[in-house]
Image (cartoon, coloured by chain):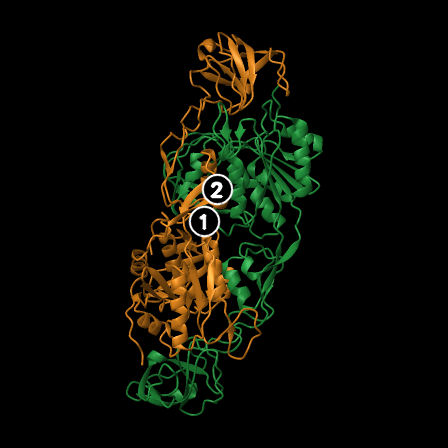
Chain colours: A orange, B green
Amino acid sequence: MVEIRTPISVSEAVARVQAEAVRLGSEFVPIEEAYGRILAEPLIAAHDVPFFDRSPYDGFAIRSKDSVGASGSGRVAFEVVDHIGAGAVSDKKVGKRQAVRIMTGAQLPQGADAVVMLEQTQETAGAADVEGTETNASFTIRKPFEAGENISFRGEDMRSGEEILPAGSLVHPGTIALLATFGYERLEVAKLPVVGILSTGTELLEQGSALEPGKIRNSNGPMIAAQLRRMGVRGRMYAAAVDRLDDMLDTVRQALTECDCLITTGGVSVGDFDLLPAVYERLGAKVLFNKVAMRPGSVTTVAVLDGRYLFGLSGNPSACYTGFELFARPALLRMMGAQRVYPMQTRAILGEDFGKANPFARFVRAVYDGERVVPAGFNKSNAVSSIGRGNALIVLPGGTRGFKAGDTVDVILPGMEEGSAVWNL
Amino acid sequence: MVEIRTPISVSEAVARVQAEAVRLGSEFVPIEEAYGRILAEPLIAAHDVPFFDRSPYDGFAIRSKDSVGASGSGRVAFEVVDHIGAGAVSDKKVGKRQAVRIMTGAQLPQGADAVVMLEQTQETAGAADVEGTETNASFTIRKPFEAGENISFRGEDMRSGEEILPAGSLVHPGTIALLATFGYERLEVAKLPVVGILSTGTELLEQGSALEPGKIRNSNGPMIAAQLRRMGVRGRMYAAAVDRLDDMLDTVRQALTECDCLITTGGVSVGDFDLLPAVYERLGAKVLFNKVAMRPGSVTTVAVLDGRYLFGLSGNPSACYTGFELFARPALLRMMGAQRVYPMQTRAILGEDFGKANPFARFVRAVYDGERVVPAGFNKSNAVSSIGRGNALIVLPGGTRGFKAGDTVDVILPGMEEGSAVWNL
């Protein structure tokens, strides 16, 4: 008996999943371990940056008014009265026609309001050497300087109290630089979700087993573990006698007491051994959808129970891969309060014809080079090679026509560290 | 005294760095730990995939010749003689007007050469139930099937012995799916480089210190550690009395006995406390360049000694960030034998005017949304906020004009997991 399922659009399916996200709590981690996490609180500037007026160049701090009238034929001379490296503060006040030799990043001495770059000067006596001992030098300049010229002013980069990054930002290397600037040693981030993985399918052999007639090795479980790993999450593996409803049910119940989310692969179709629909029913889970107008993975099913997700991904590897990126990853990021939950999406030139028209939207594993995108070889929902070879997904809208080389198409880039806040599926 | 340095182009600088890469050895890791590593050997298909002719659908395996002439007004009936789930193999040979109920992924039974999808049938007696006990059913079809219809043939995805991925491929989730398919439990990958980090600068406070007059906290060291972490490498921190040449020299020598590569920040300019040029000279290191026609980071210096890199990055945070992504990361990936050593590069619409013309190429920290790219706020080489806020780098060629909103510009996406084999700088 064929169960009739009503397909919904991909964007509707994504929206239904997103609407069910329950926020995880937060925890503190050392800054060294914060990479890839999601900020639980906005990042507020703890002080002005720079914290003092400073020199962006190696050169000499002067009073700009002393440079008035300087020209090639009427060079103005300055006496060097002090010599400070970055981190040092001069105790001299710069007086008339005086200068302080200053290094990049050093605090501007009192009295000075401009910096002459080293290469804008001509030395006239006694160079200061590497050891910094000799300071009685002098130099001339050939142009006037304005007040404020070549100065990095206190607070010009960030103002004390300013929100630098909103809560929900991904911690990437630039974020780490900010945190270090403000002296953070630990950071409040969203907890990572605990995600269970259960691969169903009576044909599956466990990892490392020898092949047996009619059977295949389980590739979906390790693949999803790696998709989770890519987002910094460690998956927890479950196993069940997948042809026995009671055993499946026990395993899923157990997983739901230990996990925020359970991802199953296989068992969501209408085959006689597809037990997930019965599992959802027995659990009393709310099924958000069990048919999506997409290829591959139209049987993808998502349910929720007590604030926990049950992602029922297709057992076909390409469909499984796509289902994770389309539904599970954005949901997990939403649970962490991320601002950008969707993978980066862009447009690219299709590199070859894609003839097959389909009423459903199609996601094609593909190789993207920054300009063109080409399907990654053999393209069936049960193909594995194309997932291994691809770095992108082409998104082809459903319709009655195929696509031609040269067409501009949408592309999803699942490997991009920072994702997108919007999605145009 | 101003040292005269001759700038070289960014692409020339990158090429010089790449040319010095010494290959690291390989090691075996469990497949669970292989994510993000670089394949040391090509991945060869250990067997055909699929390993047997199989059904891509839930349905019935039949002999196509029995379906000849089937039509809506002349339906043809089949008797179901066996019922197999995925992973099971039927011991029945399909005879005349016989069918075997077959699940997605199951091996095609003997005698059958086509699969009728479940939804293409009309049941006429005794449905097989979920437990699979009842098999004496029958159904009719209304169209003929061709030999081979709805069959996934042995080897159609991958052929035994075929090179699926070349050595140097990044292990991403799709790669893991391939490895699992072929039963790998461990994998030969390039060793990770040991990378030292030494932040120089007399103005630097250690992490977590209270601010002092004229000083700033060290943000470059933690940032580079995170840039390394993004590529799966753990940095090793070094410290030295950075205003004393002998101490610097000792530290750098020590680091070079322990690391494949040492990244320093600061100290490469022409300031009086910039000791790195003297360090390179005393070590007898070969300086590849000490001036690059780029902003920020024109003083970026790269040297090599006994097959080890010395990356002398600018102490300015934005310059430091950019220098790592432009020079260090591609070099480390080359040491691992990676096929794609450069970050993904694409083109985007500039979202606002960028007026400043510069004879040097300019790299601007920016926010990219898949279509447009906008500078990430305050743009000076010593800015930190823009690194924290950006997810991309705009590449503006050197020249005499600025750039206008609406111009198409090159963009580097440092967060992209899979990079590029070519670079158009």
- Indicate the quadrant where residue B136 lies: bottom left
- In the picture, which quadrant includes the N terminus of chain A? bottom left
Callouts 1 and 2 on one subunit: yes
Q: Is residue A232 visible?
A: yes
- In the picture, which quadrant includes the C terminus of chain A? bottom left
Question: Upstream in the sequence, badge 1 or badge 2?
Answer: 2
Label number found at residue A351: none
- Indicate the quadrant where residue B354 lies: top left
**A225 shown above or below A186:** below
Q: Where is residue A27 in the image (x, y as percent from the top left)?
A: 41, 47
Amino acid marked by disc 1? Glu
Amino acid marked by disc 2? Ile
**A371 shown above or below B380:** below
- Disc 2: which chain? A
Label number found at residue A31: 2
In the rendered image, which residue does mark 1 sit on?
A417
Asked whether A208 or A59 is in front, the reply is A208
Label 1 crowd (10 A; few <14 / some 14-19 / many >=20): many
* Local secondary structure at mark 1: loop
Q: Where is residue B299 in the image (x, y as percent from the top left)?
A: 57, 30
Q: Distance between the residues labelled 1 and 2?
A: 18 Å
Q: Where is residue A31 in the image (x, y as percent from the top left)?
A: 48, 42
